[in-house]
Amino acid sequence: MRQIGKRIGVFILAALVLGFAGHAMALDKFEAELKVKEAAILVEKFMTSPDSGAPHWMLKRAKAVILIPNMVKAGFVVGGKYGHGVVCVRKADGSWSEPSFMVIAGANVGFQIGAESMDLFMFVMRERGLEGVLKNQVKFGVDASVAAGPVGRTAEASLSAASLSADVYSYSRAQGAFAGATVGAAGLEVDEDTNKSYYGKDATSKEILQGGKVVAPEAARHLMEVLARYSK
């Protein structure tokens, strides 16, 4: 009976989360600007965290990054997560693209009581992961494999191209604690309405990320510069 109740709970939460994501309220221009500024702060915090050697290594080699400031995790018995964020892609010359807005949502089973906010930093390391990001929608575990990023003083020394088994690696930061993060049954979807609010014109996520379609506002340029500084 308990298992049946849990399965029903998972189904209901998944339906609610996915429905919420599909009808998520777009950010207005001010909120979008604030989200980009938060993303830049997120990069600074992660890159200056103790034992951040592995994230530094990954950022220097990543094909794209996904930045979700203040992602909400909440629930009782069955947990869920939801958040607005941005994705930036590394260009051929090593610089970073303008940010495209994304929404992440998902459901996971676990005994989580109350609500928690955390920052999520994801490194797209393989071409398959990049192809997923360039689409309008990505289901982690289906379109791209995802794993918790390694941490610790010896993690960087053990990393190499051959040691990477996942398309995407994720890290979380909550209440000052830095760790590898599992995202479970999560999905990432392009936030087209927020892109339009922020850039003042219609542009697909692929057009934004591949360059030439939009002009980066000041906060976006700052985020691109921060990524460039730490990925040198």
Image (tube, rainbow, N blue to C red):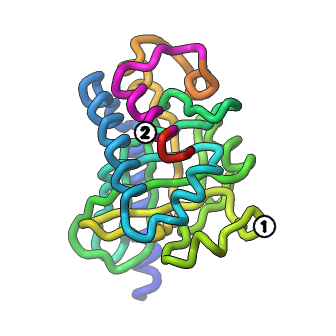
Residue lying farthest to the right in this orientation? 162
Q: Quadrant of the C terminus?
A: top right
Looking at the image, residue 217 lies above or below residue 76: above
Magenta includes 221?
A: yes
Q: Residues within 10 Å of mark 1 (few under 14, many from 20)?
A: few
Q: Quadrant of the N terminus?
A: bottom left
Looking at the image, residue 223 lies above or below residue 105: above
Magenta stretch in the rendered image:
212-228
Q: Number of marks in the image?
A: 2
Quadrant position of residue 72: bottom left
Q: Residues within 10 Å of mark 2 (few under 14, many from 20)?
A: some
**Is the magenta region chiefly helix, strand or loop?**
helix
Q: Position of residue 218 (x, y in %)?
A: 35, 21
Residue, disc 2: 226
Mark 2 to mark 1 CA distance (whole Å): 28 Å
Question: Which of the two residues, 96 or 68, is positioned nearer the viewer here?
Answer: 96
In front of the other: label 2 or label 1?
A: 2
The residue at 54%/69% (across/down) is 148
Q: Position of residue 2 (x, y in %)?
A: 40, 87
The answer to whether 141 appears left or right of 24 in the picture is: right
The answer to whether 128 appears left or right of 69 in the picture is: right
Q: What secondary structure is found at the residue carrying circle 2?
A: helix
Residue type at tag 2 = Val
Residue, disc 1: 162
Question: Which of the two residues, 226 or 34, is positioned nearer the viewer here?
Answer: 226
